[in-house]
Image (cartoon, helix red, strand yellow):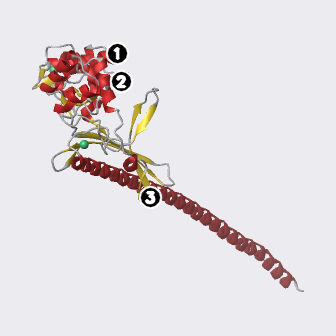
Amino acid sequence: MTKAQRKQLSSSSKNYVPMCLCAYMQRGSILIITLWILAILSLLAISFAHHTAVGIKLTKYHISSLKNLYICKAGIKRACYELNRDKEENTYDSLNDSWSSNPEAFKNAGVGDGAFTVSYQIEDDNKDMTSVYGMIDEERKININKLAKNGVQDEIRLSQIKKLLEILDIDTKIADYIVDWLDSDTGVGNAEEDFYQGLSAPYHCKNDLIECLEEMYLIRGITAEIFKKLKPYITVYGDGKININTAGEEVFMSLGMDDTLAQQILGYRSQDGGEEDLYSFKTIESIISNLNSYQPLMPTQVHILTTLIETGYLTVNSSVFTANVTSVLNNSKLVKRVNVVLQREEDNIKIKYWHES
Ligand SMILES: [Ca+2]
Ligand SMILES: [Ca+2]
């Protein structure tokens, strides 16, 4: 090999090594870039899958929620049906009516993918809470809006509410504060505009009717404890008459009856008439004679009843009903509650109040 050939060979081998290295590095970069792209795509796919899963869950929740609402609406339809049916069956309203206690219609009644229940809780003789499957008529309670008549305090109704507060062991001043909230005057009383404007977060005294019971939390002196005690006995609906077929002892006594008379009414009502509703008061005129036939009334008791009947404080009918409807779906823990107040009129039923939770 000549000197020139050796020089050429040496030169070509020097060039060969960097060229190989360059190609190797190029392939490595492509691999790294590919891996990065794969990683980014995987992350995007995971993120997309997560979003889709959340979306599917939300859609399922909304579908279940909607189904639950319509099951509650079916419960309300059933309540309206029972109210209309009852109107055909009799001309009075009592706890023996189909709207009142009717597990067949209102307890866990299957609709589509779930079931509805229309119920409320009462205290039984052992002071335990028990469910009644049906509606509550508002005429078993005292309408506090009637404490003010045309914007002026009604003395007789004020004394009735004070009696109720006494029975429930609540300060009777609360009755005056409720009157101040309702009556049209703004200066005479202990809970008028001045009081509410003097609060750390002031607001106006309403000087008008209460639209829903929870509004009472705005009235001076009404605490959660007092509201809970009062709630079963008061309402803001109805014409102010008390249904003698549905009211309880506390309400009868607040009307001025003694304990014996209140118990006599409850005793008459609770007699078992078998299939027939024999022991409801069917007309106002029959109240005294029915009670006398059950157990002779004292002259003072006859006088109290006569006065209450003649002054229009008693009735045998109800027209406003509260339905607490709960719906559950099969295979789901999702529960929906709708509380409605229904007013039964001559030829239709009006919704007076609606609350969903
Ligand atoms: Ca009836
Ligand atoms: Ca007032």
Q: Is residue 28 above or below residue 356?
A: below
The amino acid pointed to by label 3 is Asp
The reply to whether discs 2 and 1 touch (Cβ–Cβ < 8 Å) is: yes
Res 191 visible: no
Q: Which residue is mark 2?
A: 229
Q: Is residue 61 above or below residue 338?
A: below
Q: Taking the image as four quarters, which one is ligand 2 found in? A: top left
Q: Earlier in the sequence, mark 3 or mark 2?
A: 3
Q: Residues within 10 Å of mark 1 (few under 14, many from 20)?
A: few
Q: Which mark is residue 169?
A: 1
The x, y position of residue 342, in whole percent, is: 25, 43
Quadrant holding the N terminus: bottom right
The amino acid pointed to by label 1 is Asp
Residue lying at the far right in this picture: please name it: 1
Classify residue 157 as left or right of residue 266: left
Q: Is residue 308 above or below residue 88?
A: above
Classify residue 317 as left or right of residue 184: right
The reply to whether discs 3 and 2 touch (Cβ–Cβ < 8 Å) is: no
Q: Earlier in the sequence, mark 1 or mark 3?
A: 3
The amino acid pointed to by label 2 is Lys
Write down the quadrant of residue 121 in the picture.
top left
Q: Residues within 10 Å of mark 2 (few under 14, many from 20)?
A: some
Q: Which residue is mark 3?
A: 113
